[in-house]
Image (spheres, coloured by chain):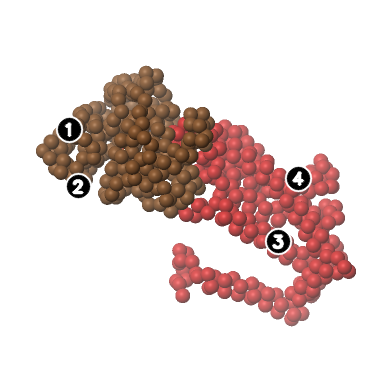
Chain colours: A red, B brown
Amino acid sequence: MTEFWNPYVAPGARQRRLLGVGAVLALLLLWSAVAGSGLVSPTKLPAPWHVISAFGYLAWNDGQSMLLTATLWSVGRLLVAGLLVIVVGIPIGIVMGAAPQVNAALSPLVDPFRSAPVVALLPILVMWMGIGEAMKIAFLFIGAVVYLIPMVRDAIQAVPQSYWIGARDLGATPWECIRSAVVPMAMPRIADAVIVAFSVMWTYITVAEYVNAREGLGQLIQNARRFSAWDQVFAGIMVIIALALATYQSMLWLKRRLYPWETEQ
Amino acid sequence: MSAAPPVAPPARTPPVSVVLKDIVQEYPADSGGVTRVIDRVALTFDKPGINMLLGPSGCGKSTMLHMLGGVRPMGVTTPTSGSVLIDGVECHGAHDDAVMVFQRYANRPDLSVFDNVAFPFRLKLWKSRVPAGEWRQRVADMLKAVGLADKAGLRPAQLSGGQNQRVALARALVLRPKILLMDEPFGALDAQTREEMQRLLIDLYQSWPCLVVFVTHDVTEALMLGDRVIVLSTQPARVADDFTVSETRPRSAAWQRSPEAQALEERILNQLHASPGKGQVRVTL
Ligand SMILES: Nc1ncnc2c1ncn2[C@@H]1O[C@H](COP(=O)(O)OP(=O)(O)OP(=O)(O)O)[C@@H](O)[C@H]1O
Ligand SMILES: [Mg+2]
């Protein structure tokens, strides 16, 4: 047993897993107890077993899987918006980080959005773009890109100057220093920014699909809520959490594969 | 231990000249005025050779070295007055024919040893100077010369400090530069590794005799390596002494104990002690 009040010693892998699983089980137990005791009405808190059966219903019913269709739609929107975030946001962040004048000009336009209520933009987007796919993609894009751009900029600025000087000394033009020395050194942190962007988009997906979605996980939850099918609402939320977690873990794994040197130094 | 013999045939280095004309360097001082760091230094390097720039720490050695075609510290004009001529042309900032080896090896952690040494060939400048077919061979030969041929695929984090400095040295010399600037390149290494690196430098120099300007505050290092030793005084730096050492390299430990070497060491230490100051020099042994 390691010391309790010591933030510098991590528990072993087994102990960590045990504690993590234990906490989840404890919560499930508490939830079951509260729901089973009848203290809270099932219309307010569905029991875990009801959620599981609702999940089964959504996963397969009447020869089709509502869950799969909804998931594919949501994932599709996320991928399109994510691609846009990467293609547009990363270059802007790099230029802002690499050229202080550009940063001075653009950061007052970008930085405030990090604390702005992006959700409040939704009606404006609806007004501008209608209620179709473009609006949903645009909403996800804006929600994520305002996080990504400052993170990419910071990643560039965090690269030690010695790499810039080293390249410059070898005869690199300033732009070559950025492209061949600074950006490659910033890549792990840029990858972190992409991971955060995808996490943010998962949190916004329900909002994006709030308005006039015919398909999607957000719509599925919205629809279930309308019929007070709280077990389905819970199931839908859990699917989103699971997908977000899977996205995060697999992107993290990919990042570690791509940039193994980051942790070596 | 001796490094594998360099594969490239002894090449003829192009002629080179570097002239410092009445260099003065001042920096804004905390008090509001200016501090003169370098005071009217005039030096001429007109042939290949290993030139040791010796002085107490903080006297302005790095500042002076950067003026010889290195990348200069940002935000200040260097030199404050005077001029630097490389091959007769006034030089401001980085020069294509001068390559620097830093004390803290500037190796890229994301690239393999091979790619670190090959890095310059990704740049327009060296792409235009070295044909595509040639640089791979050059890099491979260079890795052999510094004894890292079997480590080509490793990353810098997987190498020791000395091996990392070999990578830095290889990356500089693979370019066959006219001018090699070295800023206390072996200062961070332990005594034994430092000696190994000094021997390696001598070997490499023999196959590519260029104009080396080597900054150190180690008197022994200066005497073991230098064709010429330039002693700088404490701040503001002036040329306190400037002499040649004719003993052939590699210089033996016996030579180091010879009256001649002892006299030179005495001479340097007297110079340094004559200039009152806070700086320190080191004598290894
Ligand atoms: N950009 C700068 N602004 C102000 N002062 C500076 C600047 N760069 C260097 N100096 C000062 O100039 C003096 C010489 O610095 P320099 O780095 O050239 O010394 P050095 O001889 O290389 O020292 P060391 O042996 O420690 O490497 C120091 O006192 C330093 O504080
Ligand atoms: Mg220095």
Q: Give yes or no for contact between labels 4 and 1 (Cβ–Cβ under 8 Å).
A: no
Mark 3 surroundings: few (<14), some (14-19) or many (≥20) residues within 10 A: some
User: Which chain is mark 3 on?
Assistant: A
Where B26 falls versus B113 (above or below)? above
Between residue B173 and residue A176, name the one nearer to us: B173
Closer to us: mark 2 or mark 3? Answer: 2
Assign a secondary structure to mark 4.
Answer: helix
Q: Which residue lies furthest to the bottom in this view?
A: A37
Q: For the residues labelled 1 and 2, say whether their Cβ atoms are less than 8 Å apart.
A: no
Residue type marked 3? Leu
User: Which residue is rendered at x = 51% and y = 35% of the image?
Assistant: B133
> Label 1 sits on what residue type?
Gln
The amino acid sitting under disc 2 is Leu
Q: Which residue is drawn at 29% across and 39% down?
A: B202
Occupied quadrant, residue A217: bottom right
> What chain letter is assigned to the residue under label 2?
B
Q: Is mark 3 on a helix, strand or loop?
A: helix
Q: Which residue in the structure is indicated by mark 4?
A: A138
Same-chain status of marks 1 and 3: no
* Residue indicated by mark 2: B285
Judge depth for marks 1 and 2 and give the one in front. Answer: 2
Measuring from the top left, give residue A209's x and y in whole percent.
Answer: 80, 54
What is the chain identity of the residue bearing mark 1?
B
Q: Residues within 10 Å of mark 4 (few under 14, many from 20)?
A: many
